Image: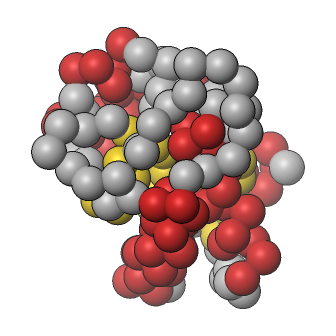
Amino acid sequence: MIKNLFEKSILVFGCGNILWGDDGFGPAVIDHLKKNYSLPENVLAMDMGTSIRDILFDIALSEKKPELLIIVDAVDHPGRNPGEVFEIPINKIPDNKTSDFSLHQFPTVNLLEELQSQTQIKVKILVAQTQKIPDEVKPGLSKEMENAVILACEQIWDFINVVV
């Protein structure tokens, strides 16, 4: 799988923990993409769980870099409705997101900024507003986030088709 990582021009990474309700949004999007879309040969979609940081370091150090990197995650953003899908520019990631467990330990924010500014990689962060992250282990998305999976896949498909 890692070999494929450096051969693809478009990478789609789903972040999240499927054991914590709506936090499993990113992995659910990747699963839906793989099952319902015929992804072009130059696209790799991967469920990153909560370990995106290591892969981003690998990409930063690699001689071959993708043209487009799409990161998909759940977010709790004030003023947004549960299940709302939207794009966040790297420099607009909410402060609470950079220090909590999601977008999965974003020192990744600095790394993403460097990848975008010092290479030709275009970075897109696509998120969906959570209904609720449970206080205890509870797999499964809320109805709002289940609907958001479909919307996110449509948006990702549009991103891919602009590049392809």
Q: Residue at x 69, y 47 (%)?
A: 140
Q: Residue at x 53, y 74 (%)?
A: 150
Residue shown at the point (35%, 53%) measured from the top left: 82
Q: Quadrant of residue 91?
A: top left
Q: Would you say 49 lies left or right of 80 here?
A: right
Q: Looking at the picture, tell me which residue is in the foreground, 53 or 156.
A: 156
Asked if residue 50 lies left or right of residue 31, the reply is: left
Q: Foreground: 123 or 76?
A: 76
Residue 16, compared with residue 40, is above or below; it is: above
Query: Which quarter of the figure has residue 109?
Result: top left
Left or right placement of residue 24 versus residue 128 in this view: right
Relative to 76, residue 30 above or below: below
Front residue of 121/92: it is 92
Could you tell me residue 89's position as x and y percent? 22, 47
Work out whether residue 3 can be spotted: yes
**Foreground of the two, 58 or 126:** 126
Give percent across and percent down for residue 161: 46, 85
Q: Position of residue 14 (x, y in %)?
A: 60, 49
Horizontal relation, residue 12 to residue 96: left or right: right
Instruction: Tell me residue 156's x, y (percent).
Output: 47, 71
